[in-house]
Amino acid sequence: MTSLNATSDSVSTIDADALIVGYDGDVTAHPQLTDEVRAAIAESAAALEPSSKAGSTVVLPGTGVSATRIVVVGLGDGSEGDLRLAAGAAARACGKQPSSVVVAIPTADDMTASAVAEGALMGAYTFNDYKSDDEVASYKGADWHIAGASEAALSRASILAAAVTGTRDLINTPPLDMYPAAVAEAAQGYAQQFPVDVRVWDVPELAEEGFGGILGVGMGSSRLPRLVRVEWAPAEAKSSVALVGKGITFDTGGISLKPPKGMETMKSDMSGAAAVLHTVLAAARAELPVKVTGWLCLAENMPSATAQRPSDVIRIYGGKTVEVMNTDAEGRLVLADGLVRAIEDNPDVVLDVATLTGAQGVALGTRTSGVMGHEEVRTAVVTAADSVDEAFWPMPLPSYLRESLDSKVADLRNIGDPMGGMLSAGVFLQEFVGDTPWAHLDIARPAFNDGSPWGFTTSGATGASVRTLFRFLETRAGL
Ligand code: BES
Ligand code: MN
Ligand code: ZN
């Protein structure tokens, strides 16, 4: 198991596979790195022309130190964001499956020390469950020694990193094994370990209570849909927050089938639900004084003889009817059920998180998520994201788009104006939240990195939104 420890030993005398040192034009003067060792590292690094650009790395043999190798990493402007990213990039340069790593990056306070530790653990993430080499598959991570960090900083970092990497694991697991009931079982497993309460709705209960969105999307698959509620409810809660996650364990598009290329990354279509589950667990582990209720809207979107058809009309929980013109616009259907049900319990604020639209990527690119909704909540989400250095950008919900969702036969149809497709999806969801303070987070592309790793962002699932959601909850708790 990965472990995270503070160390006050001289960092050059710790036996480790790698020693990470910062570079800001010179090898940084960490108090636990002696001047002689620092000068020697700087001299041998110089030949390789290290850069102070955040996350650029140069690897040296561990001459003069007890570690096997030295990773010199550029610290950029030294901000919390650059340090987190740098630690992540350095972690990826520590060689294959290190068992022990020392980090000697100077930090000013607990927040920056937490950022460095978070970055290291996120960057070191690997997903090897499906490799046949036993040694690879059984690797459980390194012992991390963070020089000069406080216990408080490391405790926050380890909770956050576990939430991000746990989210990545759920998403990266192939859809053959990660179907709706499997996600529900994972949630129930966590409830044995952590002080959260889990309830699962299976098909008969979903049908009896009228969850027509989740049932409509899920009916095309042999692996049946679920709704899961996972709740952290401390006695001293200062506020209540509902988090609703899109949990499409695989999105083929259904009868409105996607082309093959468009399906390659669609195991990531449960990223919202995975992030919600692990954010609730993190809130419980950190004992945040805020009630957090997560709703995982789980279905597999398949084309089959039992699948819903374009032009079918379904009834969302609470009674609104929707004409399903395109079965590939399925996320908004399961979320509508989840939002209405979440709001029935009167939370102070509700956020939904979803890989909702391809249009998100067209508008904002692969790394920046969109956030829409009531202005105050939207701004609070952007502020939370800024403070943890996640990229979220405010987007509007123009009222003129509403009429593009008019249906001739039902209350609404599920596709609107394709110009601004991220926004019309948001306008659809808005129909189900009434006056409850609400924001919608579209993490479609940022949730999954189908390119090369960068900083602490490994390839595959990224865990996008988890740190923002956690920071949002901290703020609601007055922290
Ligand atoms: N899961 C997709 C959105 C998506 C696309 C996420 C690419 C990540 C990467 C969603 O269910 C979808 O298919 N949306 C459609 C909506 C359209 C039919 C209105 C889309 O964006 O094409
Ligand atoms: Mn879809
Ligand atoms: Zn989808």
Image (spheres, grey):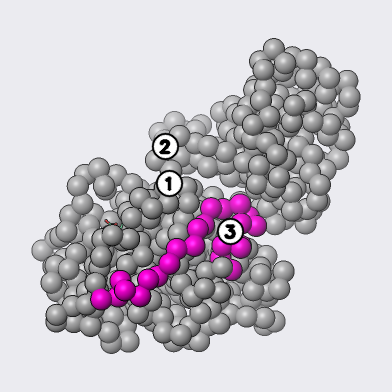
Residue 155 image position (x, y, % from top left):
72, 55
Q: Is mark 1 within 8 Å of ligand 1?
A: no
Circles 1 and 2, Cβ within 8 Å, touching? The answer is yes
The local crowd at label 2, few if under 14, some if 14 to 19, many if 20 or more residues have their Cα within 10 Å, is: few
Residue at label 1? 366
Q: Residue furthest left?
A: 305
Q: Is residue 100 left or right of residue 343?
A: right
- Secondary structure at numbered mark 2: loop
- Secondary structure at numbered mark 1: loop
Magenta run includes residue 414 = no
Residue at position x 43%, y 57% in the image:
443
Instruction: Work out whether mark 1 precedes mark 2 in sequence or the reverse, and give the earlier one.
Output: 1
Amino acid residing under circle 2:
Gly
Residue at label 2? 451
Q: Is residue 207 left or right of residue 162?
A: left
Q: Is residue 365 above or below residue 466?
A: above
Residue at position x 53%, y 42% in the image:
457
Residue at position x 68%, y 74% in the image:
477
Amino acid residing under circle 1:
Thr
In front of the other: label 1 or label 2? 1
Residue at label 3? 385
Separation of residues labelled 3 and 1 (CA atoms): 16 Å
Report the magenta residues as a range: 380-403
Relative depth, front residue between 283 and 440: 440
Q: Is residue 470 left or right of residue 33?
A: left
Q: Is residue 89 above or below residue 25?
A: below
Relative depth, front residue between 350 and 186: 350
Separation of residues labelled 2 and 3 (CA atoms): 23 Å
